[in-house]
């Protein structure tokens, strides 16, 4: 039931996603986890302080765990999505938007569980304010020393609470936006869409999803940079420090990141599928 082409498309999409959006992800985590409200006044201030104090390379802090997380997440996400699609629907079935959304949210249960350890390490590295990177190995060792192996699964309930509704919105919105673009050009398949339309649809879908689930992501980040912090205590800390606005601290960075990152994700996935389709067609015998 597993189709390696779907897994490969998820891996390609992960590379595109991470390197297009990681600087904004670093800023998002810094804004979400700052303990002094006046530390950063916004996205621009946060970016300029990071570059000035820590250098440009700091905008790609956590690149290795972020990439490993994204590869695992998207390989599992798109593989699980394909397996569930084949289990629940006929090969030639025309899926509704709600079907696409439900498939995305169900697949997210598997991907969220798979990525949590890398998410913990990524958040730890990104929230580190030192000019010298702590280092991946030392960061993993610190988490395990402080909290045991279960520390690598810190924030899993929040990741599930974020990713399941996010992917419901993400895949559903992507279907809505691509269907709209197809109707403009009277197309019958997403494979006919111009790459720019795929990029735009993916970016808009990402921005839509992040806007809806962002408060949970703030709580998740607090849980993952702390030690044995529960969901309720992390949420209470955010509320006590900044009220309702605290749950949207870093929102602009997340949306700014989501457009190029998720646009590039779907572009990478779609272009990989088109390449496999082209290769399959090219290998068919003449007259077949």
Image: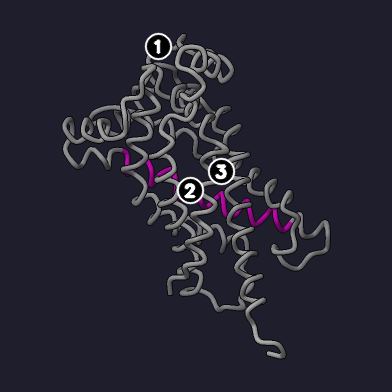
Picture coordinates of residue 105 (x, y %)? 47, 55
SS type, badge 2 = helix
Q: Who is closer to the viewer here, 229 or 28?
A: 28
Q: Quadrant of residue 269?
A: bottom right
How far apart are labels 1 and 2 at the CA level?
30 Å
Span highlighted in magenta in the image = 155-179
Q: Residues within 10 Å of mark 2 (few under 14, many from 20)?
A: many
Disc 1 + disc 2, Cβ < 8 Å: no
Residue nearest the viewer, comparing 285 with 139: 285
Q: Secondary structure at mark 1?
A: loop
Residue 140: x and y in percent read 25, 35
| Image point (35%, 51%), residue name | 114
Viewer-nearest of discs 1 and 2? 1
Magenta stretch contains residue 172: yes
* Residue 275 seen in this snapshot: yes
Q: Which residue is mark 3?
A: 209
- Residue 136 position, x and y percent, is 31, 34
> Residue 60: where, in percent of width, then height?
48, 30
Residue depicted at x 48% and y 73%:
88
Q: Earlier in the sequence, mark 3 or mark 1?
A: 1
Query: Which residue is pictured at 51% across the width and 41% down the height?
Result: 18
| Pointer 1 residue | 36
User: From the viewer's perspective, is 253 left or right of 154?
Assistant: right
Q: Earlier in the sequence, mark 2 or mark 3?
A: 2
| Label 1 Cα neighbours within 10 Å, binned few <14 / some 14-19 / many ≥20 | few
How many neighbours does mark 3 have within 10 angstroms: few (below 14), some (14-19), or many (20 or more)? Answer: many
Residue farthest along the bottom direction in this orientation: 287
Distance between mark 3 and mark 1 Cα atoms: 28 Å
Q: Is 121 covered by the magenta stretch?
A: no
Depicted 118 relative to depicted 234: above or below? below
Check contact, mark 2 vs mark 3: CB within 8 A.
no
Residue occupied by mark 2: 165
């Amino acid at each position: 039931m597993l189709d390696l082409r779907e897994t490969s498309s998820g891996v390609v999409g992960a590379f595109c996603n991470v390197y297009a959006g990681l600087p904004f992800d670093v800023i998002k985590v810094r804004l979400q986890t700052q303990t002094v409200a006046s530390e950063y006044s916004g996205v621009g201030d946060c970016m300029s302080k990071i570059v000035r104090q820590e250098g440009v390379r700091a905008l790609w802090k956590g690149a290795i765990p972020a990439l490993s997380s994204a590869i695992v997440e998207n390989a599992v996400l798109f593989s699980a999505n394909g397996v569930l699609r084949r289990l629940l629907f006929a090969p030639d079935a025309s899926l509704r938007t709600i079907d696409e959304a439900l498939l995305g949210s169900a697949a997210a249960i598997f991907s969220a569980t798979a990525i949590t350890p890398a998410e913990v390490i990524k958040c730890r590295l990104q929230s580190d304010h030192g000019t010298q990177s702590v280092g991946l190995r030392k960061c993993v060792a610190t988490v395990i020393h402080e909290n045991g192996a279960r520390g690598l699964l810190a924030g899993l309930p929040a990741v599930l609470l974020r990713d399941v509704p996010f992917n419901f919105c993400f895949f559903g919105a992507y279907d809505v936006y691509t269907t709209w673009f197809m109707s403009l050009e009277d197309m019958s398949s997403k494979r006919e869409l111009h790459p720019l339309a795929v990029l735009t649809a993916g970016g808009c879908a990402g921005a839509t999803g992040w806007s809806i689930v962002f408060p949970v992501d703030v709580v998740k980040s607090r849980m993952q940079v702390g030690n044995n912090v529960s969901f309720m205590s992390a949420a209470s800390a955010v509320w006590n420090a900044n009220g309702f606005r605290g749950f949207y601290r870093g929102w602009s960075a997340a949306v700014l990141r989501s457009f190029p990152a998720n646009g590039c994700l779907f572009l990478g996935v779609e272009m990989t599928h088109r390449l496999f389709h082209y290769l399959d067609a090219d290998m068919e015998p003449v007259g077949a």
